[in-house]
Each structure stands twice: as structure tokens, then as C-alpha cells.
Image (cartoon, rainbow, N blue to C red):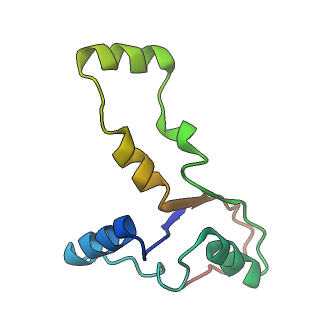
Amino acid sequence: GWDEICPRDTYGQLMCAARSKSGRPLKCIEKYPSLEAVTERFEHHGLTVPVTTAYERLDIFLCDVNERTRVQKIEPFTDWEDVIEAVTHTVTFSTLHTGAPVVTP
């Protein structure tokens, strides 16, 4: 899964405003605004869940180098700054279903 973090910096404020305006507010971001807070949320419920920033897992967003090279020749991608900004405001986590209760905000 994933959660957005860092609601108070410039990008975070824009992200929160855009989601609220679209009718899809970020419900947990104020209560769990950081990587540490998201981790503590799971630990509080007795779950050990690996939580990392999406920036640290940027590799999951990148395609094979040959495909990336082919696409770059067709239309160069110049918005890496936007991608980096977005993924530094997102944490990812993985869980296995063990019958434990669902963690809610």
C-alpha cells in the first residue's frame, strides 16, 4: 500500500489542496505526516511492516533500460523533477494477510 506524507511543505500543501478539491481528501496525512509516524501507526497495532519512502523505491517506477532508451528517442521525458517531488511525498509498505484486524485511521 501507500500513504502520502509531508503535508506542510509547499508541494505537500499543493497535493493536499488538489486532492481535497477533487473530492478525494487525504484522510490520514495530518495524523501520520511522516515516515516515522506511518511506521509507528503499524507498530502501535502490533504489526511489523517495512515502510520506506517511494523515492527509495524509485526503481519500481522505472522500466527496462532498453525500453526507456527507445521511448526517450521518440519523446524525451523532461519532468524528472516532478516525479522526484511526488515520490518524496509518498511512503510504501507491504503486509501479508495474517488474519490480524485491519488498521484504520
Q: Give the left or right position of residue 87, taking residue 34 as reference.
A: left
Tag count:
0
| Quadrant including the N terminus | bottom right
Q: Residue at x 53, y 86 (%)?
A: 31
What is the x, y in percent for residue 98?
Answer: 75, 68
Choose top left, top right, bottom left or bottom right for residue 49.
bottom right
Query: For residue 50, which quarter of the picture?
Result: bottom right
Q: Quadrant of the C terminus?
A: bottom right
Q: Residue at x 56, y 61 (%)?
A: 91
Quarter-of-image position of residue 15: bottom left
Residue 14 spot, x, y in % from top left: 29, 69
Q: Is residue 67 visible?
A: yes
The residue sitting at 76% across, 74% down in the picture is 47
Residue appearing at x 56%, y 83% in the figure: 104
Report whether 96 appears left or right of 46: left
Is residue 105 left or right of 40 when viewed as pictured?
left
Q: Residue furthest left?
A: 21
* Placement of 81 over or under 46, stated as above or below: above
Q: Is residue 45 something that shows in the picture?
A: no
Pick the residue in front: 96 or 94.
94
Q: Position of residue 13 (x, y in %)?
A: 34, 73
Residue 86 lies, in percent from the top left, at: 41, 54
Relative vertical location of residue 88 with respect to residue 67 in this rendering, above or below = below
